[in-house]
Amino acid sequence: MSHDTARVERAALETDREYNPALALLRTSVGRNAGLVVALALICVVGAVSAGDRFTSTDNALTVLRLAATIGVVSIGMTFVIIGGGIDLSVGAIVALSSVWCTTLASQQFAEDSHWTMMVLIAILVGAGCGLVNGLLIAYGNIVPFIMTLAMLASARGLAEIISDKKTQILGAKGTDVSGFKDFFNREILGVDVSIWIFAIVAVIGWVLLNRTTFGRRTVAVGGNPEAARLAGINVKRHTVYLYVLVGVCAGIAALLLVARTTTGSSTHGNLYELDAIAAVVIGGTLLTGGRGTIVGTVLGVLIFSTLTNIFILNNRSFSEQSLFKGAIIVAAVLLQQRLASRSTTT
Amino acid sequence: MTSQMTGAPGAQPLLQMTGIVKEFPGVRALDGVDLDVRAGEVHCLIGQNGAGKSTLIKVLSGFHHPDGGTIAWDGEEASFSTPAKAIDRGVATIYQELDLVPHLDVAENVFLGHEVSRAGFTHRHRAYERVRELLARLGHPEISPTRIVGELSPAKQQIVSMARALSRNTRLLILDEPSAVLDQEEVTNLFRVIRDLAAANVAVVYISHRLEEIREIGDRITVLKDGRTVATGLAVADTPTSELIRLMTGRSIQYVFPPRAERGPDLGGPVLEVRGLGLAGVFTGVDLTVRAGEIVGLAGLVGAGRSEILETVYGARRASTGTVAVDGKVLRRGSVGHAVRAGIGLAPEERKSQALLLDEAVYKNITVSTMARFARLGFLDQREERRRALELTRSMDVRPDGVTRAANTLSGGNQQKVVLARWLLRDCRVLLLDEPTRGVDVGARSEIYQLIRSLADRGVAVVVVSSEIDEVLGLADRVLVVREGEVVHESAATAIDEAGVLDLVMEGRVPA
Ligand SMILES: Nc1ncnc2c1ncn2[C@@H]1O[C@H](COP(=O)(O)OP(=O)(O)OP(=O)(O)O)[C@@H](O)[C@H]1O
Ligand SMILES: [Mg+2]
């Protein structure tokens, strides 16, 4: 594989190669995830010290998780696409389009007439549809994922603006009764919001899918060495399509969580979600070159980001400061990853 | 045939490695290895798969950091802790797995890390000129310095690696199984270059599993076994081959081919039928029928189109003319999925880029083509996967034998066995094997031959491509000789000898 030889090169040009047991541990995914847990714990300590009770309360913990849920669901899907050797920049736009589509008066009316789950279905189908278009054009049209999903980013948001006429659509406006929908998503089970449960379920399904099924194994093969996967008889193109549909579905679910939380659908929803999701996945130790990554890492990555955001808010720091800090963390994580990757190439 | 130039024998060695130890998690790859190399000699390093040859030379090239032992260079203790230090001292290494950057062009690869530049600007013309000189010296003036390396054949890529080694002031050249990707003619060319270098007082360390080559090019031999030196500084001229094999393996095995079953008329019906297959610009009009239980060998030069024929039969390349049929059913052109469902398997030539998932466990590499068999409703039974994989790796003597280790922790020959195991697991109707024993040691080689023969005896139609003519002749029932994209000869393997095949390969005909 090309990135492999590139790694050999990098290793060959590297100057200092002393053996370090701590680094060796960090190279395994279990070790890396343990590292992330430590990082998260440290961040929590900082939170507790700087914001005291306001940070440590159960309520605040739930706030953090609620914040994590929406972006978390997207990140799980993104993990699959990235392990499979691709990238999806259009998730935020798909969230917007799904949210707008399932809150149009027509779908609300439709949902009221039949059942509120129709709205859920619509949101997920819109996500899946966008993913299908992405996947088909990437796999069979040979368009680079970066470009294709960039195009989708622009078009999906554009379509969302057209559908909504750039106005925020309010759930249950104009007398439609979608209380079933609201009741379902705003319920708590065992004191925890439904949205958090949904994130947990998506994460568990994602883990099982990646680690225990042929689908997951194929994803790793397709991302790790597409030529080898193809010659081993895996239908690489079709699998690529599945991956983009999967992330599209995740974006659809995220749109539902967002609609429920804000009771609105808007073409500005999900703005920059793609960046947050990619950042969480990368921090979680998934290689951007494909072939390697973990769901646990992604979940930890999401939690680290949402906890940080929470601490910044509790301490009344500006959004700008927060962004600056996030950027620094991403760079640090990638630098660490590259060092580990080049050191682990010894064959 | 001893080498002509042995520079100043008896002089102090250029390189002296003593008691080198290298441990990987769970394996002691080197356990006190000694090696001394003199300027101007060709020193051969031999040993079974996993003996530690590649690890030893990676210690020397600064790629691995040894856990013990000392290295003396020019009589003084020296550190080779980084590739930069090794390169500065004049050590150039051609790794077993080529290490070029595929997206860069030939010249950029040759000068990677020491670009020809003036005030920070790369000096293209001068670089191209020097690369052209180097390539000419290596006997390959036809390679253009501006070609993208990824588009070159493995053999040509190796020439580029050599050019890179020569572009620096090299005092010690290390070649790790260079002949594995070369055919006879190119090996001859390589030997010419090596002799020139030795004559210019460069020391050469040469690793190969082909003992005939060592007879031809080597001056002295060091034998490794299980990470230890079992013999060092043996003179090639007075060490018999049987002695070398005994030293390497600890037993005296014979390099034998399994007997062909006494059949003929009772051979099964045709399984694979290829008619008029062609790939624009590469090969044309290939007809090939393989019956159940038959092994057909494709001989020819590297680049003659043999691998392309296999890949086209397999659907990995889209044929421009002709048909491929399995059991009478014509396959869709250019569809690997269709070929696999029809029961064709391909073990490709380039294990690293075409076959292996290097970061993944050995058992996952083995089951990747048969996953569905271990799955119920998409859920994998990993215990069963590991059990079957372990059975296979044991029967093929893959060492070390744990199937949960990552594929990239295995030695080159053992990786090759893993690739073969993948297709043995699948009950193929047709098995296409491209260089199945590349990099595999003498002992394991006969085991692989046995395996291939027993598959055929179970009714599989096998096609083998090999650059080693004796392998094709010894293993196959029928031989096809491919030259410049055309089948120029077809006969029973017993009806032609090595010289005959060589003539066909070179001249396209048997001289009267
Ligand atoms: N990065 C690694 N991690 C763990 N074990 C390794 C690693 N590299 C090599 N080994 C082990 O070290 C031993 C020696 O391997 P090495 O590649 O040196 O063998 P070799 O003599 O070159 O064999 P071959 O002829 O097959 O190329 C093997 O048991 C191999 O599995
Ligand atoms: Mg080796």
Image: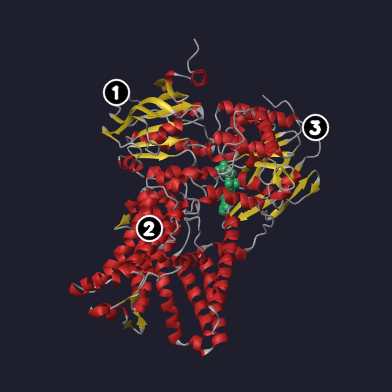
**Are callouts 2 and 1 both on one chain?**
no
Colouring of the image: secondary structure
User: In the rendered structure, the residue with mark 1 lies on which chain?
Assistant: B
User: In the rendered structure, the residue with mark 2 lies on which chain?
Assistant: A
Tag 1: amino acid: Pro
Please indicate whether residue A135 sits to the left or right of residue B118 in the image. left
- Residue, disc 2: A244
Tag 2: amino acid: Tyr
Residue at left 38%, top 30%? B295
| Residue A293 coordinates in the image, percent (x, y) | 47, 61
Can residue B206 be seen from the camera position used here? no
Taking depth in this image into account, of B289 and A36 the one nearest to the observer is A36
Residue at left 38%, top 69%? A267
**Disc 2 element:** helix
Q: Which of marks 3 and 1 is nearer the N terminus?
A: 3
Asked which quadrant contains residue B206, the reply is top right
**Disc 1 element:** loop
User: In the rendered structure, the residue with mark 3 lies on which chain?
Assistant: B
Please indicate whether residue B451 sits to the left or right of residue B59 in the image. left
Ligand 2 is located in which of the four quadrants? top right
Task: Give the answer, above or below, for where B33 lies relative to B290.
Answer: below
- Residue, disc 3: B8
Which of discs 3 and 2 lies nearer the camera? The answer is 2
Do the residues bearing badges 3 and 2 touch, measured as CB atoms within 8 Å? Answer: no
**Disc 3 element:** loop
> Dot 3, how many residues are within 10 Å of its Cα: few (below 14), some (14-19), or many (20+)?
few
Residue at left 49%, top 61%? A286
- Residue, disc 1: B265
